[in-house]
Image (tube, helix red, strand yellow):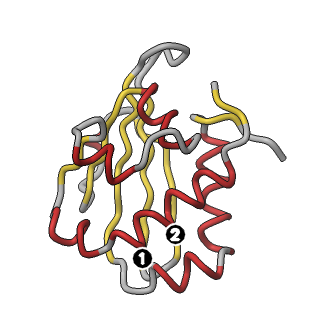
């Protein structure tokens, strides 16, 4: 099934991918922290989209679309414009480079994030593998 990023179908597909990917389960086995991803409107995206992912020890315990990031308290809040997220999803922008150049804003414990670079990169790999169509 081909799902369009960003959408609830894409988020549900990512949930399934994270829970069935042995490589991600192994690499992220020590990860503890949920996240909110805010995609700000730009280009083809006309309104803000907010995703919630509950990530815990190499599994995804749940996902949700939120109307507002303030609906949940999460360990990390990542936000970027649609075009920058699209560039990350299509492999044209390295996620760590995006953080360092502030094309991707991260709120949360940066020490944890920086110690967990392999987990972050493998999470992005999973996102990329399910992202076949972009809005």
Q: Is residue 8 above or below residue 26?
A: above
**Residue 16 drawn at (x, y percent):** 67, 64
Q: Residue at x 18, y 50 (%)?
A: 107
Crowding near the residue tagged with mark 1, few <14, some 14–19, many ≥20 C-alpha atoms within 10 Å:
some
Q: CA distance from mark 2 to mark 1?
A: 6 Å
Q: Residue at x 26, y 57 (%)?
A: 76
Q: Which residue is mark 1?
A: 56
Q: Is residue 100 above or below residue 14?
A: above
| Local secondary structure at mark 2 | strand
Q: Nearer the viewer, residue 120 or 47?
A: 120
**Residue 71 drawn at (x, y percent):** 29, 44
| Local secondary structure at mark 1 | strand
Query: How many labels were placed on the picture?
Result: 2
Q: Is residue 62 above or below residue 43?
A: below
Instruction: Quadrant for residue 98, please give it.
Output: top left
Left or right of residue 102: residue 47: right
Crowding near the residue tagged with mark 2, few <14, some 14–19, many ≥20 C-alpha atoms within 10 Å:
some
**Residue 134 drawn at (x, y percent):** 65, 30
Q: Residue at x 60, y 79 (%)?
A: 23
Q: Nearer the viewer, residue 113 or 74?
A: 113
Q: Nearer the viewer, residue 116 or 101?
A: 101
Residue farthest right in this picture: 1
Q: Which mark is residue 22?
A: none
Q: Quadrant of the C terminus?
A: top right
**Residue 88 drawn at (x, y percent):** 48, 42
Q: Which residue is mark 2?
A: 60
Left or right of residue 87: residue 37: left
Q: Residue at x 32, y 69 (%)?
A: 33
User: Is there a contact, CB below 8 Å, between mark 2 and mark 1?
Assistant: yes
């Amino acid at each position: 099934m081909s799902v369009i990023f960003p959408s609830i179908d894409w988020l549900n597909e990512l949930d399934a991918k994270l829970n069935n990917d042995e490589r991600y389960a192994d690499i992220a086995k020590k990860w503890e922290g949920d996240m909110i991803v805010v995609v700000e409107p730009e280009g083809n995206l006309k309104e803000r989209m907010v995703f919630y992912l509950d990530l815990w020890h190499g599994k995804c315990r749940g996902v949700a679309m939120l109307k507002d990031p303030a609906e949940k308290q999460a360990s990390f809040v990542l936000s970027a414009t649609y075009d920058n997220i699209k560039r990350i999803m299509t492999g044209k922008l390295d996620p760590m480079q995006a953080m360092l150049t502030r094309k991707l804003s991260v709120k949360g414990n940066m020490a944890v994030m920086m110690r967990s670079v392999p987990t972050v990169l493998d999470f992005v790999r999973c996102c990329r593998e399910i992202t076949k169509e972009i809005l």
